[in-house]
Amino acid sequence: MSHNRRVLLINPRMCSLSAVRLPLSLLHLGAMLEGQYDYQLIDGNLDPDATRTALAALDREPHALVGITVMPGPQVGPSIAMSTAIRAAHPDIPIVWGGYFPTMYPEAALNASYVDYVVRGQGELTLLDLLERLPDAGPPPSPLASATDPSCVEAIHGLSWKRDGEVQHNPDRHFQPPSTFPRLPYDRVGDVRPYLRPSFMGVRTAVHQGAIGCRYRCEFCGVVTMFNGVTQLEDGARLAEAMVTLRDRYGATAMQFYDNNFFDREETSVPILEAMSEVRMPWWCYARADTLANFSTRTWEDIRRSRLSMAYIGAEAASDAVLREMKKGARVEHTFETARLCRAHGVIPEFSFVLGGPNDPEGEMEKTFEFIRRLKRIHPECEVILYFYSPTPRRQRLTAQTRETGLRLPVMAQYGPDGPPLPTTPEEWAEPHWIDYVCHQDAPWLTARMRQRVKDFSTVLGCRFPTVQDYRTRPWGKAAMRAMASWRYATRRYTNPWELKLARRLIPLRQPQRESL
């Protein structure tokens, strides 16, 4: 163990205790540090005073660096507070931001005085390379001019940093298959049990991410910016091994897979499904309608045997024209066919829709409402989640020779060819309206009438078809809400469902799970 080579890895708060899950990003980094560096994980979702815990650790012993994982949206504010406190108390300790936010907005992150380095994309190898070039403790080194010098951070792929206040972007790092990295050190989080939360699938639901990336390039999805169309898969044996470990060692009874696109292709999915069938745990994942619609009957039988309970599927729109504009790569017929196949094989599809695009947003909203009604006739148990369209910046290739942000937005006529001007600091991204924007909860081109129309439809739909994920509300409560919402749903009178809003104060139905990047 190298003298004073200590690393602090932090997951700032981003959710309530009821929604907490294993901090997979920290565990993946920790797995690379095992046996080489002394490290500590701090999870702000469980630790109510994570900042004090971090400062106490830094006060006790010198550290080589502090690594903070940052998602866009509600995690940015706590990340700012954490970083600011650490910089004030320990100004010489390098602070590194990694994850989706700094990958998507590296210049904004480095515009903060409390961020020294940004790790873009997959961070395991980049973190190790950076640690090799930093002293045991003390201020960040002055990078040398030659990128061939092993002590120069210029040589580290996937890293962005500052030279004399100027932002520098090193070349991207190639993504590696998850199976090439060590297994996750679950015990490093301490007690694993608080992370195994109840869900509709089981009383102790664990999480895992095997595959990374997605080969598709949807305009609204942050996965594109993170992985730039690259997909790397975990083999079936390793994935099943993680399930067995979480089940047998820690008592997990169900699994959620946070793979960006679990079913990449049919030929790669079959061996994974066969391995999972031996474990026989109910599970949830992300999937695409076009992929599932084209699976063979035999593969769908493998899906049934593997005990897939629910798949989160991006239906997105009610017309092929809009799907083409979004660069979705799928057609509406795939959504209908997937709904039929899911019903036939005991899977609940969780369809997400993106409303309020740049062309005829009101008209497309009404078409989408009718589309959802057709889906409900095919598969009454299907879940529906509604988002607003907000284009995600696309990352061009970043090099050490450029200071350009490398980001562009799809054309939005109201804001010119570059779309709406984006924030340039973490503090601006932490403002409520930008959190809503990046989480697809709002967009500046939407009218008040459009926002309210979607809220009213969502209220009626959610009461008429209570989500299966609501395992707390009693059956009589769900039945009462279904009955109250029936006439509005049948007559399409969604406007101002005051009686349903009032009833939900007494029967607080849970909403379907929401995911956004």
Image (spheres, rainbow, N blue to C red):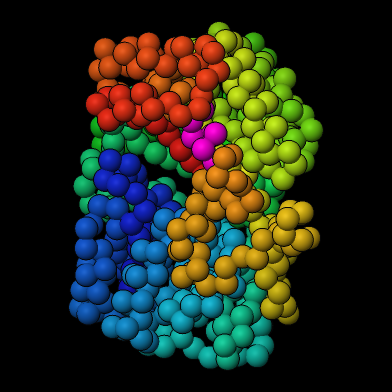
In this view, 495 is above or below 448: above
Q: Nearer the viewer, residue 348 or 204?
A: 348
Residue 340 location (% of width, % of height): 61, 12
Q: Main secondary structure of the magenta part?
A: helix
Horizontal arrangement in the rendering, residue 372 relative to residue 419 (left or right): left
Rendered location of residue 135, percent (x, y) = 42, 84
In the foreground, 250 or 12: 12
- Residue 218 visible in the displayed image: no
Q: Is residue 1 above or below residue 220?
A: below
Residue 468 rendering spot, x and y as whole percentages: 39, 21
Q: Is residue 222 left or right of residue 306?
A: right
Q: Quadrant of residue 96?
A: bottom left
Magenta residues span 451-458
Which residue sits at x=21%, y=63%? 49
Q: Is residue 352 visible?
A: yes
Give the percent coordinates (x, y) of residue 168.
63, 79
Tell me: residue 452, above or below residue 336: below
Query: Residue at the spot x=51%, y=46% of the render?
Result: 441
User: Which residue is located at x 33 percent, y 73 percent?
Assistant: 6
Q: Quadrant of the N terminus?
A: bottom left
Q: Residue at 61% across / 37% down in the picture?
A: 354
Of 366 and 50, the residue lying toward us: 366
